[in-house]
């Protein structure tokens, strides 16, 4: 079993590097995108963030509502990646989705740091980091799985040895089921643990 796992990672190392590079590139692009925003756009962002901070402690949704909302959003995202991986030409779209999630993360953290410098970085650590410690690896694994499956089907088709979708969809979907379970864990952390840090750090962001 250990040898099979090592062989799997060795064969797919190139794809892992591509997916990780795309995610990292998305994070960097998101952080740099703030420089292209106008003064009014930055003022609007600051206003929305102030409303979030002021309303967070009295949020009517509560942890349960946040859990359902985050679960719905992340599972739809994961389902879309799974679906695109089934197609011969789905891999560039999978790569785009991974980069887009990195962009979102980079933009969020970059905004907090730009707004409040070290205090913003501290707030981002408590509000963004806990659940993303689980969510980012699962996204990379899911993206890599879909990318490699789509690429395998395309390469097999070009070599005139078609890859049977029926033969591989079981193991492919099983991998995504495991990714979905890890995603559910990340969502639980986002709904029930991250808000604790947010409440503790809100006073520092208001200084």
Image: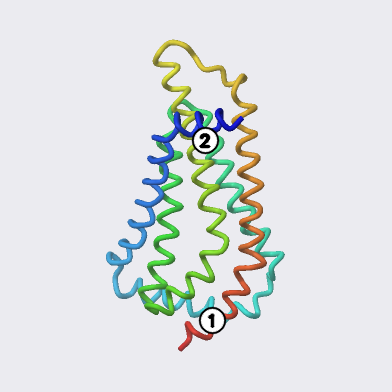
Mark 2 sits on what residue?
Answer: 145
Q: Quadrant of residue 178?
A: top right
Apparent side of residue 140 relative to residue 68 in the rendered image (left or right): left
The residue positioned 68% from the left and 70% from the top of the image is 61
Distance between the Cα atoms at labels 1 and 2?
A: 38 Å
* In the rendered image, the vertical position of residue 154 relative to residue 123, given as above or below: above
Which of 89/1 is in front? 1
* In the rendered image, the vertical position of residue 118 relative to residue 6, given as above or below: below
Neighbour tally class for label 1: few under 14, some 14-19, many 20 plus, Cα within 10 Å: some
Q: Position of residue 184 (x, y in %)?
A: 65, 52
Which of 12/149 is in front? 12
Query: In the rendered structure, which disc, 1 or 2, sits on the residue that comes first in sequence?
Result: 2
Most extreme residue toward the top is: 160
Looking at the rendered image, the quarter that the N terminus falls into is top right
The residue positioned 43% from the left and 54% from the top of the image is 102
In the image, which disc is placed on residue 202? 1
Marks 1/2 in contact by CB < 8 Å: the verdict is no
């Amino acid at each position: 079993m250990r040898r099979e796992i090592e062989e799997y990672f060795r064969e797919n190392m190139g794809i892992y590097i591509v997916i990780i590079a795309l995610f990292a590139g998305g994070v960097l692009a998101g952080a740099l995108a703030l420089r292209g925003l106008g003064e009014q756009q930055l003022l609007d962002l600051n206003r929305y963030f102030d409303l979030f901070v002021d309303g967070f402690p009295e949020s009517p949704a509560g942890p349960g509502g946040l859990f359902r909302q985050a679960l719905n959003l992340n599972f739809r995202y994961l389902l879309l990646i799974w679906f695109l991986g089934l197609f011969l030409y789905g891999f560039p779209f999978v790569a785009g989705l991974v980069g887009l999630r990195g962009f979102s993360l980079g933009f969020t953290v970059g905004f907090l740091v730009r707004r409040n410098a070290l205090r913003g970085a501290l707030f981002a650590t408590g509000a963004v980091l806990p659940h993303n410690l689980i969510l980012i690896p699962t996204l990379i694994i899911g993206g890599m799985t879909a990318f490699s499956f789509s690429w395998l089907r395309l390469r097999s088709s070009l070599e005139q040895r078609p890859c049977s979708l029926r033969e591989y969809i079981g193991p492919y979907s099983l991998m995504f089921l495991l990714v979905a379970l890890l995603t559910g864990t990340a969502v639980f952390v986002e709904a029930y643990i991250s808000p604790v840090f947010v409440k503790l750090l809100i006073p520092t962001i208001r200084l």
